[in-house]
Image (cartoon, rainbow, N blue to C red):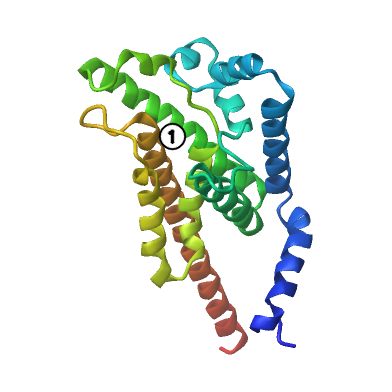
Amino acid sequence: MNARSPQGLPARLLRALLTYPRRSPLTFCYVGLLVLGHVWVENRLSPDRADVLRDYISTNLDNLHDHPVTALFGSALLYDGTLTDFASTGFGGTLITLGLGICCCLAWAERRFGSLRAAAVLLGGHLGATLITAVVILTALRHGWYPESVRQASDYGISYGAQTSLAFATVALPRWARLPWAAFVVAWPLSGDSEWPGPLPDFTTVGHLLSAALGFALAGTAAALASRRRRAEAALAMAEAAEAHP
């Protein structure tokens, strides 16, 4: 049976699942850590202690001023969403961020570019978008576009890093699919029912758009480097052929 035929699809999916931990060990461990952390907070901690933890790792302005390292890295270790309420609209966000963004796109980046570069994509999106968003919030507060309560807002989770991974995966697609995929990556954060408090959307939407921009920039850089490497290899092959057949 041809492995690429429709009948061979289940076998290919099973093989991909069985080899996932070996081919994408960083992503596999990260997803496991996220699931364990989510179960621990939701089912093992009391509601009060869980709220205290979420407040402490939120990357709001007050926490970034008081304990920036703990907030920045702690927020990336706790998933903000539902893993079990399949009928809710929030589960759609789980499918996009945890499913597509981390389990698929980050895993592809790890297989294609290695664990260190994949981690750089994830952390670059999470840290970069969070810090730039903080600057946007400070600017908006000075102009009265955001309420002062945004300084203590709850904001944690993996979505910025996942959004960067989604955008970065553009480089893996054929040319005809890149524009529709990019449109999806940009559009889904804007599809919620949150209201704009002023001339800017809410700060989480700003963060998602910024993280997408970072992912597209990284994808463009990766594509340019790959093209340069192919040209160099082609030039070297031509030079070797010329030496072999003067």
Looking at the rendered structure, the kind of residue marked 1 is Ala
Q: Which sits in the foreground, 73 or 195? A: 195
Residue 111 percent coordinates (x, y): 66, 57
The residue wearing badge 1 is 129
How packed mark 1 is, by other alpha carbons closer than 10 Å (few <14, some 14-19, many 20 or more), is: many
**187 on left or right of 1:** left
Residue 111 shows in this picture: yes
Q: Secondary structure at mark 1?
A: helix
Q: Which sits in the foreground, 154 or 131? A: 154
Residue 180 percent coordinates (x, y): 37, 63
Corner quadrant of residue 67: top right
The residue lying at 64 percent from left, 82 percent from top is 6
The residue lying at 48 percent from left, 61 percent from top is 171
**82 on left or right of 224:** right
The residue lying at 59 percent from left, 32 percent from top is 76
Q: Quadrant of the N terminus?
A: bottom right
The residue lying at 69 percent from left, 38 percent from top is 35
